[in-house]
Image (spheres, rainbow, N blue to C red):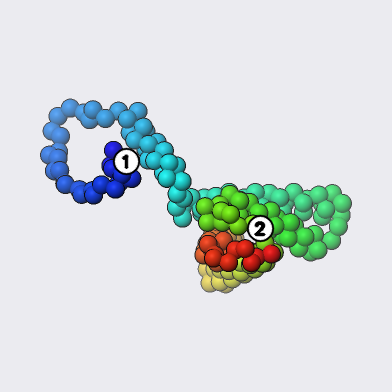
Amino acid sequence: MKFKAFLAGCSIAEIPIVFIDRKQGQSKMSKKILFEALLNVWKIKKLTNRETGLDHFLKFSITGGLGATTNLAIFFLFADMLNRPEIPVSIGCFIVAGTQNYIINHFWSFKTITAGAGVSVKRWCMFMTSSLLGLAVNVSVLTIILMNWVLPYKSIAQACGILAGMAVNFILSKYVVFRKRKADAKDI
């Protein structure tokens, strides 16, 4: 009701109510009511067609997972099965997976920001650059941790590096690559 009142332009104020702690008995709120209330929050959010930074981050993360899967599948095919040199194959995998991620992020992860704007070579280059910067942060954090601490598993340092690199890549993607522009029509 409050959301509908907000949409209708009504002013809204909160009046606190103090509940005295229950001394006996159980709450009358069932799990069904609790889950229904949580579900309604998502339904209201969908009605407004608004996405939060968390929505963008979750979609960005899923897209990154798809890119990693594509990267590994192509690498396996060319490096392991066809016995091609690892470094050129790895670079090709980065370009293919990065392009896939750029397109998915454009049309899905950040679609509320990029609505009406087409994909562009300029934005693709910006995305690939932000991905390389994210990789540089990943490797830097990994190196710093391994040089300064003794860990039971090196993969802990890699996980920290991945998280730091992903955060940098997400911030650059959201606020630089896919930000709303007035001159989107000028993009190639």
For the N terminus, the image quarter is top left
Answer yes or no: is residue 51 visible: yes
Residues 121 and 60: in front is 121
Q: Is residue 35 above or below residue 173?
A: above
Answer yes or no: is residue 134 visible: no
Q: Is residue 31 above or below residue 17?
A: above
Q: Residue at x 30, y 28 (%)?
A: 30
Q: Position of residue 139 (x, y in %)?
A: 62, 68
Q: Report the side of 99 relative to 114 (left or right).
A: right
Q: Give the structural element (helix, strand or loop) at label 1.
A: helix
| Residue 160 image-quadrant placement | bottom right
Badge 2 or badge 1: first in the primary sequence:
1
Q: Disc 1 designates what residue?
A: 4
Tell me whether the residue at label 2 lies in contact with that at label 1, contact meaning CB atoms closer than 8 angstroms.
Answer: no
Q: Residue at x 84, y 61 (%)?
A: 85
Residues 73 and 115: in front is 115
Q: Residue at x 69, y 64 (%)?
A: 188
Q: Which of the numbered marks, if any, corresponds to residue 119?
A: 2
Q: Is residue 68 above or below residue 126?
A: above
Q: Position of residue 161 (x, y in %)?
A: 57, 63
Q: What is the three-letter code of the residue carrying label 1?
A: Lys
**How far apart are the alpha carbons under marks 2 and 1?**
36 Å
Q: What is the three-letter code of the residue carrying label 2?
A: Val
Q: Position of residue 171 (x, y in %)?
A: 52, 64
Q: Position of residue 56 (x, y in %)?
A: 51, 53
Q: Is residue 5 above or below residue 109?
A: above
Mark 2 closeness class: few <14, some 14–19, many ≥20 residues within 10 Å: some
Q: Give the structural element (helix, strand or loop) at label 2.
A: loop
